[in-house]
Amino acid sequence: MQTSALPDLAHTGAKAVHWLATATAMAAVVAVAGLLQPEAATATAEASEQRVATQHGGTPAPDPESVAFPLDCGAAGRTVADSAPGDLDGDGRPETVAVVRCAAGSGTPPSGIYVVTQPSGAPPRVVATLVDPAQKLNVTDFTVRDGRISATLLGYSSAEVPRCCPDELEKATWRWKGSAFVRSATPAASTARGV
């Protein structure tokens, strides 16, 4: 038998007391790290709403969860998949743009994009439908920035295309001009095997 040229490492044999000491030390480090997190890391939805209200002169953006959207989902109900505030018409009061679809246990039902406003003292309401779910489009890459709404719209060239694999893609933007939202888009593109 050949002897090792390395020093004897007998002290590396871990015993239960070593594991217990290590576990206790790690728990202490995790606990201290949790207590020392910056205040921003514990932000709540309420703090986020306050930031939006501050950006728009103290007026909070309408809550899309409290709106009756023109979307018939039957017993399935609806879900707000995404939303973002912004002063779209330059009046100093924020609107909320919401991507809404029927709730589904599986799959991705078509989405609608709605603009929600809330006049002073009134409940929030839909003032514009930018994408109607009847168009059978899925919405991705949704943003609201500098008065502009942007989204990528995924669609289907025919009824034969499987609903899992949209084969058309369009990048669309909307901007308030005069008294309506004007849409501009990159022409729809077809893809061979989905987007």
Image: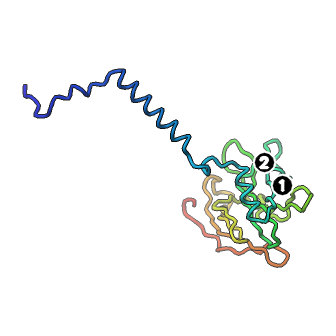
Asked where in the image residue 61 lies, by quadrant, the reply is bottom right
Q: Is the image coloured rainbow, by chain, by secondary structure, or in one colour?
A: rainbow
The Cα–Cα distance between marks 1 and 2, rounded to whole angstroms, is 9 Å
**Relative to the observer, which residue lies in front, 172 or 48?**
48
- List x then y, in percent, for residue 43: 65, 49
Q: Is residue 114 above or below residue 164?
A: below
Badge 2 density bin: few <14, some 14–19, many ≥20, Cα 10 Å:
some
Q: Is residue 37 above or below residue 173?
A: above
**Helix, strand or loop at mark 1:** loop
Q: Which mark is residue 92?
A: none
Asked where in the image residue 151 lies, by quadrant, the reply is bottom right
Q: Residue furthest left?
A: 1
* Amino acid type, label 2: Arg
Q: Quadrant of the N terminus?
A: top left
Point out the tag, 1 or 2, that comes first from the N-terminus. 1
Q: Residue furthest top?
A: 16
* Amino acid type, label 1: Phe
Residue pointed to by mark 1:
69
Q: Is residue 72 left or right of residue 83?
A: right
Query: Residue at horizontal 51%, vertical 38%?
Result: 32
Q: Which mark is residue 78?
A: 2
- List x then y, in percent, for residue 60: 80, 58
**Helix, strand or loop at mark 2:** strand
**Relative to the observer, which residue lies in front, 184 or 146?**
146
Query: Are circles 1 and 2 on residues that touch, CB within 8 Å?
Result: yes
- List x then y, in percent, for residue 100: 75, 54
Query: Residue at horizontal 57%, vertical 65%?
Result: 191
